[in-house]
Amino acid sequence: MTLAIIDVTLRSIINRTSMNRIFGRQILITFILLSLLSPLTGSSVNPKREMRGVWLATVWGIDWPSVTGNSHDIRRRQMIEMAALLDRCEAMNLTTVFFQVRCMGDVMYKSQLEPWSSFVSGTRGVSPGWDPLKFVVEECHRRGLECYAWVNPFRWSSGTDYDSAPDRKWKEKGWLLTYGKYTVFNPGLDEVRQHVVDICREIVSGYEVDGLVFDDYFYPNKIPEDSTVGDYCLWQAQAPWMSFGDWRRANVHKTIADVHSMISDLRPEVRFGISPAGVAARSRTSASKWGSEPVEVKADDWQYAEIYSDPLGWLYQGTVDFISPQIYWPTTHETAPYEPLASWWSGVSNDYGCHLYNSMTLAPLDKRNTLAERGELLRQIDTNRSTGIGGYNGTVLYSAKFIHKLAPDLMKAHFKGKSLSPELRHAMSVADDDREIASPEDLRLKGHLLQWGSGDTGTSRGEAVCHPRRYVVYAFPSNLSKDEVMDENGDGVKGEYLFRVVYGTELNVPKGHFNFAVTSLSGYSIESAPIFLK
C-alpha cells in the first residue's frame, strides 16, 4: 500500500465526524496501518469469530466520565472522552463494548422508570442534557462495534442514602433490603423482579443495543440467614419448606429467567448474559445439584452462599446466552489458577449450549506494567482460545481505562486483524430455510466510497435470524481469484481478509491493488454468501 493511499483514507476517516478531528494524527495513522495492512498479509493468527469485549465502567467514574455535570462544556468533554475510548476500541480490533448504563437504581439514558445517574450529571435525578446510551450505541455502530448494555440488576447503594422521588417511592413500598452498608432491591419481591424486567425492556425496546449483560452483584455480601434480616418474614411467608439460601437463589433465578423470556419475545437477536465470580460449583455447593463435575481448584465458591449467585443453575435452565466469569487471577495463582478455571468453564458452558466469554482483569498493569505482566495476560487470551469449544468463545477485558497499556502487544499478534462475534448458539436449531440470509446487491465503488444495497426483500421468515443487521466488508489483493479467498472449510471469505463491520450500506475504502466482497450479517451473526465487486 502506498503512502498516498494511506493519506487519502486517513483524510476520509478524519472527516467522518467533527469529533474525530480532536484525536491525534498518530493514533489514526496507527489505526489505518493496522486495519488496512494487517488483514491483507495472509496472517491466520486471529480466529474469524470470537468475542473481543471490554467493560466500560461508569460507576464512580471508573472509566468514564472524568467530570460530571450538565453544562454545555461538560457535555462536550464527556462526548469527546467517550469518542476517544471508542476510537481506541476500534483501533484494537475489539468487537464489543459493555457500557454500564445502570449502576445503583440510576440510569445513563432517558428513563420513565428510574432517575438519571449522578455519575454522569453530578446529581441523582438531574438530566445531563443528553442521552449517553443513545450516543454510545450510535458511536459504537459507526465504528463497527457492538454495544451491550451493562446493567446491575439489584444494587441500590453502597452506603449513600439516595433521596430522589423514585428513591422515596421505593422506600415507601418496602422494596429495599439492607445489610451493613449495602442496600439492594429485594429480589424476593414480585414487584422488584418485575421492575428489573421492565428496566431491561425499556433498554432493549428503546435502543438498538446488541446485547444486555448483568454483573456479579446480587444479594448483599454475607447477609445472614436468620431472623435478624429484612427478608426473613418474606421467606417464611413464601417458601418455608425451602432453605433460606435456596429461596434466595431461586429469586435470582426467577429474575434471570424472566429477563431472558422478555428479550426472547421482544428482540431475540439481543444476547443476554451474566458475569459471575470466577469460581463456582465446588463439590460442596452446587456441582452435584445440577449434575456437573465440580471445579478442581482450591479457591472457595463464595458466591453461592454469600451473594446467592448460582451460575450453574442459569446454564442448566438455559436462561443466558453467554456467561463471562471473572477469572481475575494469573496462571500461577495458588488457589485459583487461570487455566484450570477457564478449562472448567469451557466444559460446562459447552455442556449446556452456552457461549463462554471469559473476563480477565488488566488492573495489574496499572502499577506494574511489565513485560511479564503483559505476557501473562496474552497467555490468558491464548488459553481462552485453546480451551474454547466450537467457536463460541472469547475474551472480555476489565476495564476500558487500562486497555491502552496492553494495546501494542495485542495489536502485534493476538488482535492483529478484525474478528466477527460468534453466531448466536441457539440459532443453530433454526431450520435451514429460516437461516438463509440475503446477500447484499449492487456492490459498487465510486472513488473511495464502496456502496451496496441491502438485498433484503422483507419477506423472509424469522426476522432476527435472517434479516441483515450489519454488513461485513472484506478486502483482498486483486490478483487473487474468488475461489482463492474463500475458506476451504465452507466458512465464507477467509477471516484474514476481514476489513470492517458496517452498520449501514457504505464505507470509505482504500483504492489500489485491492478487490472487495461484502456479506450480510443477521442479528444472530449468521452470515450470507458474499457479493464481489465486479
Image (tube, rainbow, N blue to C red):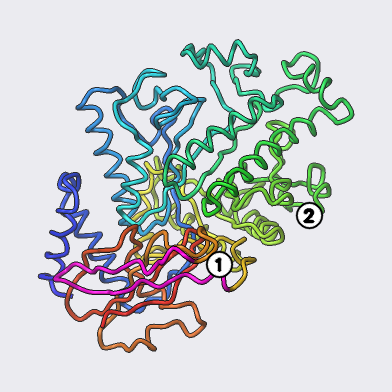
The reply to whether callout 2 and callout 1 are in contact (CB within 8 Å) is no
SS assignment at label 1: loop
Q: Quadrant of residue 499?
A: bottom left
Which residue is the extreme one toward the right? Answer: 241
Can you say which quadrant of the picture contains the C terminus?
Answer: bottom left
- Sort mark 2 into few (<14), some (14-19) or many (20+) by Cα contacts within 10 Å: some
Q: 471 or 181, which is in the foreground?
A: 471
Q: Residue at x 14, y 71 (%)?
A: 447
Residue 85 image offset from top left, x and y in percent: 31, 45
Q: Residue at x 35, y 39 (%)?
A: 134
Q: Is residue 347 magenta?
A: no
Residue 161 image offset from top left, x and y in percent: 51, 12
Query: Is residue 497 shown above or below 192?
Result: below
The residue under label 2 is 292
User: How far, Cα to Cα, is label 2 from label 1?
Assistant: 22 Å
Q: What amino acid type is highlighted by mark number 1?
A: Gly
Q: Is residue 446 magenta?
A: yes
Span colored in magenta = 433-459
- Sort mark 1 into few (<14), some (14-19) or many (20+) by Cα contacts within 10 Å: some
Residue 403 image offset from top left, x and y in percent: 38, 48
